[in-house]
Structures are given as C-alpha cells and as structure tokens.
Image (spheres, coloured by chain):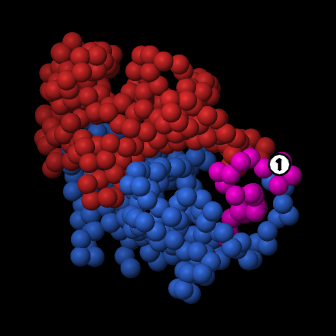
Chain colours: A blue, B red
Amino acid sequence: MSLAPWRSPLAGALHRNDSQPHCRYLQLATVRADGRPANRTVVFRGFLPDTNQLKFVIDSRSQKPEQIDHQPWGEACWYFTNTREQFRLAGRLTLVQQEHPNPALQQARQTTWKDLSDAARVQFAWPAPRETRADAVAFSPPPPDSAQPLANFCLLLLEPVQVDHLELRGEPQNRWLYSLDSQTWTTQAVNP
Amino acid sequence: MSLAPWRSPLAGALHRNDSQPHCRYLQLATVRADGRPANRTVVFRGFLPDTNQLKFVIDSRSQKPEQIDHQPWGEACWYFTNTREQFRLAGRLTLVQQEHPNPALQQARQTTWKDLSDAARVQFAWPAPRETRADAVAFSPPPPDSAQPLANFCLLLLEPVQVDHLELRGEPQNRWLYSLDSQTWTTQAVNP
C-alpha cells in the first residue's frame, strides 16, 4: 500500500504539536441506532502497519459497538491547538473484538494491548462504564496480564476515504480536500 | 427557566481553562442525509439569554443546514485540555436563518452578528466554502455592516437533553450523567 497524501501533513501536525500530550486526542463521531449522532474523545494509537488505518482502543461494554454495528461509518475531527489546524477524517470503522475471525487483525489487537500503558490497560478491568458508580475498591483491580487482552478490549480501526484539512493560520486560511476514489487519492485546494 | 445542573460544572471548566483561547472550541457531530456522521470544530458563542441553549454561528453555504434539516439532533464533545475533562452535550439543534419566523430568535441572530469580531464577520463575505479555491483577492472583501447580518449568516442553537461529564483527573476518574426528563433534570454518578 502507498501512503495516502494526507499522511504527510498529518505527521507534520503531530510533530509540531507533540509538546502537548493532548495532541493525540481527537473526537470520533458515530451514529446511534436511533439515527442520532454520538461524539466522544478518543486517543490516537498510531496507524495499523502498512495501512492508512488509524488505531483506537475501546471497551466492548461502551456504546460504540452497537453504534458501529448499526452504522459502520465514522468521522473523526482532530484539532491541533498549537498550530491551529483541523483534520476531519471520514471513513469505515472496523471493530476488532475478541472473536474477530481475521488472524492478522487479532494479532494487531494483541500488539496494541501490549503497547498500552499499565494505567490504560487496567481501565478495562474497571466496572462497566455508565453504570451506577461502583465502590472505590472496584477501581483497584489487580493489573491485567500485559500479554493477554481482556475479553472486553477491542481494537477500533478507521480507514479514511475523505480527509478535510483546514489551516486557520493561513492567509486567509488554507483548506484541502483529499478523496479516495477507485483506490486513487485526489487532492483539491478549496475555499475555507 | 432555571439553570440546568450541568451549567455550574461547565462554567467552572470554562473558567479554569480560560487562559487557553481554544477552551471555547468544541466538536459538533451531526448526521448527513446518507446516514453517515459529520464532525467539525465550532466556537462556543455563549448561551442564548435565559435558556440552556448553546450558541454557535455557521454559514448557510456550509453542509450543516442540509444535515440539520435531515436530522435536527446533534452531539457536541467539548474537551478541556487544561483540567482534562470532557462534556458531551446531546440535544436538538435549531438553525436560525435569515428567514426564520420567530422575532426573538431573529433578534438573537442580529445580536450575535453584532457581537462577532471583525475577523469573524468578514468570513461570511468570503467565497463559498468547499468550492475550488478562489483568487486571493476574493478573501479581502469590504468589511460587512456590523449592524446587518449577511444573508448567509446563521445562528445555531443546541438545547441539550443529556450531558455526560467526565473528569479524567479524578481518583480514579469521575463521571456524571445529566438527563432532562419531563422538564426535570436528574443527575447520576456513573462509572467512567
């Protein structure tokens, strides 16, 4: 696979904003079963090797799996506060749960689990999200095995087919649309 | 109207993050006519007086009006980088275009236009967004009349019925769900 043309400006943005830990936080929109949108902050976990797919990790007990099952399309909005630029990345979502049949994706799920910090891993051993607040002791479980993902740990992939890059600092501003069509990316300079 | 119970923590977050201009930037998700989500950064313009409705400004030439017409429901995700807390605000969207019949909302549209900076107002006189990049001269139009909104200027309102507040800095983390039911707000402490 070849690197999509938006990868270079995105890598540049990550580099120029990396003094800020929140530069890896972005907002992922999905659609609920009732047709209404959902939106939450997720952490960028790098790209799936040899692809243009962004990696995230999610808990199967959250609301996302049902939403993705209903509508496997997502749009991420990534605003970089230091350089004042925004990437909107729209594409198909792939949820890699424990029972996913693809061995390569299972392997990626394992590797991603291993690469998490202890603090990130232990959250998957916490009580179920959105349920009535549990006692404090429930949030101090033994640390999970770093080699074996917990059953509720999922890898989530976003494969963009359209990327909208806006630079607020341009003169006046700069904006580019990247579109994937018949496996070819086109790039267009558009009005902000 | 009474202040919703999430207004106080949100005001606190705005206050504690106000050294950063981007503390007023949040991500608004809507749904496209094809059922896929859309997501972009918008600027919080305060609350409509005597309501719990958040104000934004948008351009009628953008994709939002068609999306809101199709699905008048939105979810905003607001992450505060300094205090490390997130508000997700889900609710009905009201678009106040030039021809909106409600006089009070028309008045609010006018006031919001007047309150914009010159730099924000002039963007509504720029060439249409997302079209092929226009010549530089098109981005230096005469400044619009600050008393009379341009026809493509819209006020957008979000009236939350559910608010999900997550504090990453808690021990371990804190999360509250605020829900509006039969005109009464309930507050629940839930697992992060």
* Mark 1, other Cα within 10 Å: few <14 / some 14–19 / many ≥20: few
Residue A8 rendering spot, x and y as whole percentages: 40, 61
Residue B17 in view, yes or no = no
Question: Which residue shows up at 31% across the image and 58% down it?
Answer: B35
Report which residue position mark 1 lands on.
A135
Work out which residue is located at the far top of the displayed protein and give it. B147
Which of these two is toward me, A169 or B72?
Answer: B72
Magenta range is: A113-138
Residue B5 in view, yes or no = yes
Locate residue A35: give its quadrant: bottom left
Q: Give the answer, above or below, for where B138 lies relative to A131.
A: above
Does the stretch in magenta take in A123?
Answer: yes
Residue A97 rendering spot, x and y as whole percentages: 58, 74
Locate residue B4: give its quadrant: top right
Q: Give the answer, above or below, for where A190 lies relative to A158.
A: above
Question: Which residue shows up at 54% across the image and 50% down it?
Answer: A41
Determine whether, in the image, residue A67 is placed left or right of residue B170. Answer: left
Does the stretch in magenta take in B173?
Answer: no
Residue B182 rendering spot, x and y as whole percentages: 50, 33
Question: Which residue shows up at 32% across the image and 66% down it?
Answer: A161
> Chain letter of disc 1?
A
Which of these two is toward me, B91 or B63?
Answer: B91
Residue A28 rendering spot, x and y as whole percentages: 47, 54
Residue type at tag 1: Asp
Question: Which residue shows up at 27% across the image and 59% down it?
Answer: B34
**Count of marks placed on residues:** 1
- Secondary element under disc 1, as helix, strand or loop, is loop
Q: Give the answer, above or below, for where B46 lies relative to A113.
A: above
